[in-house]
Image: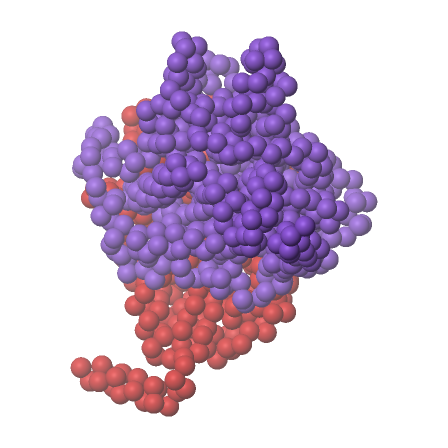
Chain colours: A red, B purple
Amino acid sequence: MRKILLLVVFCFLLVACAPAEPATLTVMTHDSFSISEDVVTAFEQANNVDVVFLASGDTGTMLNKAILAKDAPLADMMFGVDNTFLSRALEEDIFDAYQSPALSDVPAEFVLDSSFRALPVDYGDVCINYDKKYFAENNLAVPTSFEDLAKPEYNGLLVVENPATSSPGLAFMIATRAYFGDGFLEYWQSLKDNGVMVVDSWETAYYTNFSASSGQGPRPMVVSYASSPAAEVFFAAEPLTEAPTASIVAPGMCFRQIEFVGILKNGQNRDLAEKFMDFMLGKQFQEDMPLNMFVYPVNQSAQLPEVFTQHAQVASQPAAITYEDIAANRDAWTEAWTEVMK
Amino acid sequence: MSLLPTLAEKTRSFLSANSRILLWIPTLLFLFSFFFFPLFKILTLTFNLNTLTDLDNLLVARDSLLFTFYQAALSTLLTFALGLPAAILFSKFNFRGKSLLRALTAVPFMLPTVVVAAAFNSLFSYKVAGSMLQILDLQPATFNFLLILTAHTFYNTSIVIRIVGNAISRLDPKLEASARVLGADTFHVWKDVILPILRPSLLAAALLVFMFDFTSFGVILLLGGSQFATLEVEIYIRALQLPNLNLAALLSVIQLIFTLIFSILYSRTINQVSTQTTPRFSQARPPKSIRERVFVFTLYALLITFFALPLVSLPVRSLTRLEPDRGQRAEVQYGFTTDYYQELFINRRGSLFYVPPVQAALNSLGFAGITVILSLALGYPAAYALAKPTRLEKFLDPFLMLPLGASAVMMGLGFILSFGRLIASPFFIPIAHTLIALPFVIRTLQPALASIPERLRQAASTLGASPLRVWQTVDFPILSRATLSAATFAFTVSLGEFGATLLITRPEYPTIPIAISRFLSQPGGLNYGQAMAMATVLMLLTTLSILLIEKLRFNNAGEL
């Protein structure tokens, strides 16, 4: 009660002292960004600011827009660059460094940029999801390695996304590169011979081609996220006790995507941007993210919702590859992959 | 000579000398600020002649250009194979359910690609498609290619029906009657009389269809995958995913050059043909002879199968529950449910990005309304000037079509460079839609304007009518049909969020297509069901709008 009273008094003071018009903080995001209204409102009221989120396409599109507009940025900060794109953002030097105090709750393994130009916010594992019912009905063992996927019993069962147009597609290809080294192209040739299907977006892969989705496609395996089974339960039309899908989280078969936030150079609201960055790493925001975006919080003190602890899996050994390696070779790998899969 | 005609003459000559330029000002101003300027900005930054010295770049350009031509030509042929008979059906015959069927053929044009893909998918399950593949011994790639062609036909048939059908119903039946009296048979009537008159509209339709297929993007990506790299798809990949903006710029320039070539060819041909026909009552009548009945029935069945079935499958799917009630091992149960619709109104997660369905519908309709007004306001003066082309018009004409051939991706980047933070303003959404709608609107109005008999105008002027009054009494009644057609085009382009909005960002004012793609971006039966429900809402909304416009059109025709 006292706290609320204090807050009210504080708010009044703020309103009394601050200029009548609240400032505007613009945050560029990818189209999949989502957060609860009350969480944002809490920040807005505490800081007398309007936070505007500028949905700017998929991650690649958003980043390229930011690079193109770096002299006169479209926003004050940008959320959503992941570790496959991070190096490009850093090379183009679009971010100002900020070492948020909130990083104290974030394990060092997530902080990839040692000069703090991009800070981690969330992570998620890109893994193969499979249709539990299909494998049970056909008495088929679930594959436990990349090599298994090229075996004849799994002919025509897998659908993947194109790494040139889809971020889970890129993540999965990078996982195979991490596992096979330069031999990954031969591996993809063997997948191609085994009837792998390549589509351009996660939506098409999951809803049009995956048999356990509501789209009831023909293929029982799809490249998606380890948290997707939890989303299937959370968004089920009828209450489910068990997820209809599960992830293959065998060592090396998942790629850990980490998403970052950064303050855009030449932006207008440096102070507010720093505050919002602290806020994004704080407990309230971090605990709100999982059900909105189906990702994991990087803040270790954040509690996970029950549907996550029960139905989502985490890869214990995600693909081992550095973001510098990805940076140096991503385009070349994708081009070579495209040649093979043509 | 009395005083009145002299005055009228003077007004006319004044109008023809000065207002020509005046007529062009709004349209040109619009195109310069929102098309040529952003395009210039992005191309000066990214286009580099050195790109031409890299053999790899040239190979990419050659391959994508060849494939673009190939698929666009095939798609256009298929679209005409279905669209021409359909245009004759709608303009020559009356039958039960005509306006509904007509509206149905126009619906796909407005639906976002994701929805069309979902519609096809919920109709024939991929398992059926799989066994078809085995029977026909087709490669999956061939199947995908056929899907692309089918989807292009599904999308664009309404263009042929609208443009060519409009022209057929404007035909003066006396022409055909005279030809027959002079001994011509059906073949010669068509070859020597009807086809020459229809030529401008046939060309206009063919050009638009070809352009859409030529710059096709969503359909190719969703149904074919990027192994079918058209220029537009390749531009998207090179500009945003595998960054090579120089190559993207080269490809955009190639695409623009070809668009310009088509436009020049088109405007040359259309300027050779100018036909004045008096407006008529609708000549549609019930089919009489057996041949006519067979024609009507066959085509009716064909169109229903092709258009109605996938479209009906959407609402069906939005009302079907197919999850097992409990546990996972049970067989999938199908059942009726309205859950998805109820869920649309609930913001379960308290998300900031929750889109209330009514609000989304209102936003979509609002933007579409503004687009109609804007594109008619800009299209009318230009179409007037083009109806009696001088050297100025002959030069300007082809440039009007260019926005159709510009890559949406590059335009989006150009907008960022030109307008910076302003692009977040909702103001830009109808502007982007108008850029795409304007060429349609002008092309629909121009033939109608050109067909107005000059002697009617002269007669009115002679009798002392002011230019406004001439327009009101002579031009407008003839134009009302074309205006409605043009308005429908503009409306539909906006409702389905065609191309150019791809890269326009908007934090507020989410529309229905945005809501659909939000639902489809996360797993779960409820998300999928809500996407289908929202798509059904979009479909109903568009069908209703078109039916309404058709009704207006019918009433107007009655007044003529």
Residue B141 at x, y percent in the picture: 54, 26
In the shown orientation, is residue B552 left or right of residue B169? left
Residue drawn at (61%, 41%), measured in percent from left and top? B454
Residue B518 versus residue B295 in the image, above or below = below
Q: Quadrant of the C terminus of chain B?
A: top left
Residue drawn at (39%, 87%), measured in percent from left and top? A18
Residue drawn at (20%, 38%), measured in percent from left and top? B337
Residue drawn at (54%, 66%), measured in percent from left and top? B422
**The one of B105 and B145 positioned closer to us in this rendering:** B105
In the shown orientation, is residue B477 left or right of residue A241? right
Res. B411 visible in picture = no
Residue B531 at x, y percent in the picture: 34, 44
In the shown orientation, is residue A188 left or right of residue B120? right
Residue A127 versus residue B12 in the image, above or below = above
Determine the residue located farthest toward the front in the rendered image. Answer: B1
Res. B159 visible in picture = yes
- Dividing the picture into quadrants, the one containing residue B101 is top left
Residue A199 at x, y percent in the picture: 50, 36
Residue B357 at x, y percent in the picture: 31, 52
- Dividing the picture into quadrants, the one containing residue A221 is top left
